[in-house]
Each structure stands twice: as structure tokens, then as C-alpha cells.
Amino acid sequence: MDARAKILNRLQRVKTKHSINTTNDDKKNDTIDYKSIHLVTHNHKQTIRTLVEQLEMAHAHVILGSSQYCQQQLLTFLYQQKVNCLLTGDPIPDNINNLLSTSSSSIEQPPYKIEPYRQPIEQWKTHLFDEGNAAITNCLAAIANTGTLVIQPSMVEPRTLSLVPPIHIAVLYTQQIVQSFDALLNHSCWPRNMPTNIVFISGPSKTADIQQTLAYGAHGPKILAVFIIDD
């Protein structure tokens, strides 16, 4: 048995408490209740601090606080970054829709439009590559030791949302943070069936291929903003 087969067999043997439905036949069945995922680890506050430190070391913009605080900071961030077209999943996940909604007159509403991913990519290229200068997605989990966001692409939130626009906004809950990759594989958020695609993000896109000079945004988002909700 080769190394690849051994790794796949090990992953397939991981026992999970429940699976997340990722049926492609109906987008409604593809919606994940991110707030219901509970990943409790020993000394969880320290785990959260480790994740924040690792993400910031990778030049990610990190906001940690209550849902109301994150809502205010998100709207401020969109305004400061001059976001004019924000790409989202379709349908827009409830938690993200709540973050983007406000009735407070003290918060200045940035002049952006929300564009859900409603069409096949062939008809949506203009929005994806030209108009949309930011996208917002949920996270499946996060690994503190490496400062890694774990995203499970779906029909609701395709992986292009986190890979193409110059600004990627990730929404995470403190209950979703684990200490290590091994801990992730043994928690209930990890799908029982082998996922076809998982995206691991440890900061904004960067490369040093040209003259050994570090440059951001060469192969993906130039800015990564992580809003960690602690409710």
C-alpha cells in the first residue's frame, strides 16, 4: 500500500459524531449551520489567542468580539476598503445576512451592492473577476497551531469566492476553533464521507518568486479579513 492510500484510509477511518449534508442536488441541503458546530478543546481561550496571533503574523486582519461588535467592524471595514460589490453565497447564509444588516443610524453604510453567486461561472465571470472586489464566506473550522482557516466549498459557497476576489472576508465562530489538524479530524465538523474539496487558508495570497521579493495578492486575495464571533 502506497503512502497516498495509507493517508486516505486513515482519514476514512476517522469516526465522527454526525455528518454535514453536502448533497449537490439541492442548494438547501447544501447549507451548513455553522453556529451549531461545537469544537471544545482544553484551555479554549488560549487556543483562540494562538489562532489570532498566527493569523496576524501572516498579515491577516483579525477582529474578535461579539456578533454586534463584529457587525459594526465589518461595516466599517467594507467602507474603509471602498468595497463597491460584495460577493456572497446563494442563498446568503443567515449568519452572514445578519452581519450585513444593521438598523443603527450610528453606522455609516458603505455604498456597496451585494451580489449572490446565482449563475454558473461562465455567466458570472464579469462579477467574479471585474466587478466584485470582495467576497464573504463562512468557515468550517480553524486550526490554531498553524493559523489556518478550513473552508468546505459547496454549491452555496463555491471555492471561487475565497480564491478570486482581491479581498476575502471569512466568518468564524470561537466554537469552531481547534488546536491541531489531528483534533480537527476527530471533531464532529469533519464530514463522515471524504470531502471532494477542502480549502486551507493561512493568510493572504503571497509569493516571493520574482527576485525573492515578497508580494501579496499574486495568486489570490491580497487582503484576508477574519471576523471571529464570540457569543
Image (cartoon, rainbow, N blue to C red):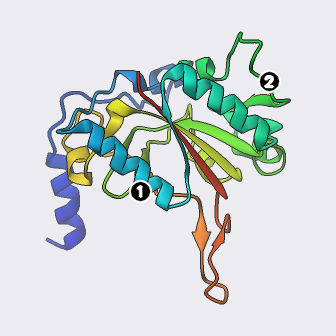
- Residue at 83% in and 50% down: 130
**Can residue 93 be seen in this snapshot?**
no
Mark 2 Cα shell of 10 Å, populated few (<14), some (14-19), many (≥20) = some
Residue extending farthest bottom: 211
Residue extending farthest top: 103
Q: Amino acid at mark 1?
A: Gln
Residue 229 located left or right of residue 82: left
* Mark number, residue 109: 2
- Residue in front for this viewpoint, 191 or 33: 33
Q: Quadrant of residue 108?
A: top right
- Residue in front for this viewpoint, 123 or 70: 70
Residue 55 located left or right of residue 132: left
Is residue 82 shown above or below 101?
below
Q: Amino acid at mark 2?
A: Gln
Q: For the N terminus, give its image quadrant.
A: bottom left
- Residue in front for this viewpoint, 24 or 145: 145
Q: CA distance from mark 2 to mark 1?
A: 31 Å
Residue 93 located left or right of residue 183: right
Q: Which residue is mark 1?
A: 54
- Residue at 78% in and 51% down: 129
Is residue 148 shown above or below 21?
below
Q: Secondary structure at mark 2?
A: loop
Residue 46 located left or right of residue 169: left
- Residue at 56% in and 19% down: 68
Q: Earlier in the sequence, mark 2 or mark 1?
A: 1
In the rendering, at what x and y percent does residue 204 appear? 58, 58
In the rendering, at what x and y percent does residue 18 appear? 23, 27
**Can residue 6 be seen in this snapshot?**
yes
Q: Secondary structure at mark 1?
A: helix
